[in-house]
Image: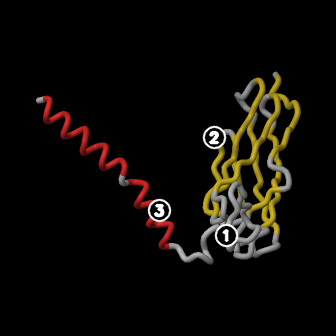
Amino acid sequence: MKWIFLIFAGLMVMVSCNNGTNQEQKAAEIPLEQQGKQPVGQTIIPGADSTGAVLEVKNDSYDFGEVKEGEKVEHEFTFTNTGNEPLIISKVHASCGCTTPEYSKNPIAPGEVGKVKVVFNSDGQMGKQHKVITVTSNAISPNTLLHLRGEVKK
């Protein structure tokens, strides 16, 4: 039993020592002109040098203040496609059934503005509120969060 354990341990050491060689070989396979193009620690900013749609929201949060229970709050979030391809919104989903979103269903061309209209029904929603609306699109960052905040009083 000792011998089996020693042989197994020896094999594991040999296999684990071989991993670095494969990584070095893979690095050597990349042409020199492509190696090191991106400096270490550089952050890639979506839309800077990339191809695709970019959904840029000017203000992703709206505070409606205080409302009486039963009142409806309506707000329109606007965004711009700052990318270089048409922006297509596939889905807009609210974190609660009390919040109903409507959105631009047509593709938004580069440089154009789109809108997400949100209606919050405060009926039965007492106290501080924070509703999250998720916008899913073909943008480089596919999910964008919008926030609706406020307080419902009796």
Query: Is 92 displayed left or right of 23 in the figure?
Result: right
- Quarter of the rendering occupied by the N terminus: top left
User: Marks 3 and 2: in contact by CB < 8 Å?
Assistant: no
Q: Total of numbered circles in the picture?
A: 3
The residue that appears at 77% across and 74% down in the rendered structure is 110
Q: Where is residue 119 in the image (x, y as percent from the top left)?
A: 76, 46
Disc 3 marks which amino acid? Answer: Glu
Nearer the observer, disc 2 or disc 1?
1
The residue that appears at 81% across and 65% down in the rendered structure is 80
Disc 1 marks which amino acid? Answer: Lys
Q: Is disc 3 placed on a helix, strand or loop? A: helix
Residue at which label 3 appears: 24
Q: How far apart are marks 2 and 3 (CA)?
A: 53 Å
Q: Position of residue 152 (x, y in %)?
A: 80, 28
The crowd level at tag 2 (other Cα within 10 Å; few <14, some 14-19, many 20+) is few
Kindly indicate the quadrant of the structure image that contains residue 7. top left
Q: Is disc 1 placed on a helix, strand or loop? A: loop
Residue 124 higher or lower than 103, as above or below:
above
Disc 2 marks which amino acid? Answer: Gly
Name the residue at the left extreme: 1
- Whichever of labels 3 and 1 marks the residue nearer the N terminus, that label is 3
Nearer the observer, disc 3 or disc 1?
3
Q: Any mark on residue 97, and which? A: 2
